[in-house]
Image: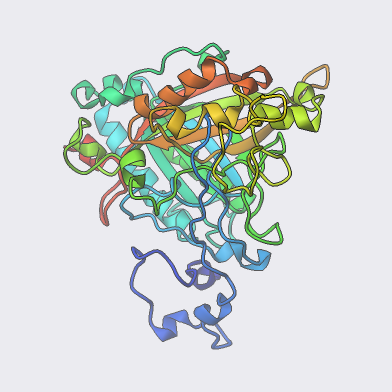
Amino acid sequence: MADKSIREARTPGAAPDAAPEESASENALPGDGISRRKLLGTAGATGLVLGAAGGAVGYAAAPSEATPLSSIGANRVMFHVKHQPGITEGLQARGHLVAFDLTAGAGRKEAAALLRRWSATAERLMAGEAAASDDTDVARDAGPSSLTITFGFGHSFFSRTGLEKQRPVSLDPLPDFSSDHLDKARSNGDLWVQIGADDALVAFHALRAIQKDAGSAARIRWQMNGFNRTPGATAHPMTARNLMGQLDGTRNPKPTESDFDKRIFVPSSGSKDPAWMANGSYAVVRRIRMLLDDWEKLSLKDQEDVIGRRKSDGAPLSGGTETTAMDLEKTDAQGNYVVPGNAHARISRPDQNGGAAILRRPFSYHDGFDANGVPDAGLLFVCWQADPLRGFVTIQRKLDRGDALSKYIRHEASGLFAVPGGAAQGEYVGQRLLEG
């Protein structure tokens, strides 16, 4: 491809796992002698800007550090890393979630070949390159655009491939919750793929390539499309908002916290999980419809009481700024809690749930309107944790018993997937499971 040298350019300050620097001659752009490093000098580091843990609906990973829009395409995420990409990176502007079922007759051998193809394609596309064969040219003019492709295994995958003894106990089906109105056709699946990018065409290009790579080994079970605010769209870096207008990501756990890895990732040793899950994580995926017509009828005060935070800046109703610790005991002149007892942010706090915390990294979605003009919109909720029973299930059970937000949302689809650690150089994702 003629523009390959441009599309393979890396953002300055790339992850430590990045490949060695290219030679000066390789960094020169054709015809002008300008280095890629100089060209991308204004690109800005993608960084990692996360909020801290909240409830099972609000509070997601904050967007990457703001960068000029003209440089967004240059940002690259590495494929061969300790933990799969798409977990700790900042929110991306466009996302696709897709689940596959293995076809009749496809087993362990076919699954291994599929994951090998998918991993090779993911590595190329995340570097801003074309697919190895039969590329659609949809992303021909774009750079990597922070593309991430993440792979996971559902509960049913293990029986389909004869690997039941390798199925983690943590992958046992989620319990039922009172807010569930689940569509089985849009839930679960043998295999799960998460795609995110800061350019819609780059994300679609990856989705199409992954679907084509499935070939005769797997068929799509369900697929959902999401979006977030584009990095750099605000005057300064800030926590993203969801479709209810609330800041969404204030209390996500931060990688700088001493227990972050313990909460989010399966340890490399001393775990109840099988060895192939070392450095992996468990993804809970929920399609959560927001009943926006009902929500938008509430006064600003009522909306803030439901959440427990100010809508304007995300600060707790007890006072301060967005990052000020919430004072759960503060009362008003009438003796009522300033942060209501059933407020979403109060109920979902880790210190109200035995320390349970999850890393939220969702996308918003909008799939049109029904015959009455009611929007089908809400949150493609994705959360990450080392143990879903101690993470999502613990928090959701608490929310299920009295969260004020439950009246304005409906869980319509669900899935739980085991996401192994990142593939080492020369490996494909899941190789230690499929060839172990």
- In this view, the residue in front, 48 or 128, is 48
Instruction: Depth check: give the residue in front, 192 or 65.
Output: 65
| Residue 309 location (% of width, % of height) | 65, 37
From the viewer's side, name the closer residue of 179 and 397: 397
Q: Quadrant of residue 275?
A: top left
In the rendered image, residue 114, in percent from the top left (x then y), is placed at 34, 38
Is residue 131 found left or right of 44 in the rendered image? left
Q: Is residue 215 visible?
A: no
Q: Residue at x 57, y 26 (%)?
A: 287
- In percent of width and height, residue 404 lies at 63, 21
Q: Position of residue 40 (x, y in %)?
A: 56, 75
Picture quarter containing residue 435?
top left
Q: Residue at x 61, y 46 (%)?
A: 94
User: Would residue 101 be found to the left or right of residue 46 on screen?
Assistant: left
Residue at the spot 48% in from the left edge and 67% down from the top edge: 8
Query: Seen from this angle, which residue lies furthest bottom?
Result: 33
- Figure check: 114 above or below 64: above
**Left or right of 76 on screen, residue 113:** left
Q: Measuring 28% from the left and 37% from the top, which residue is drawn there?
A: 112
Residue 202: in sight, yes or no? yes
- Quadrant location of the C terminus? top left
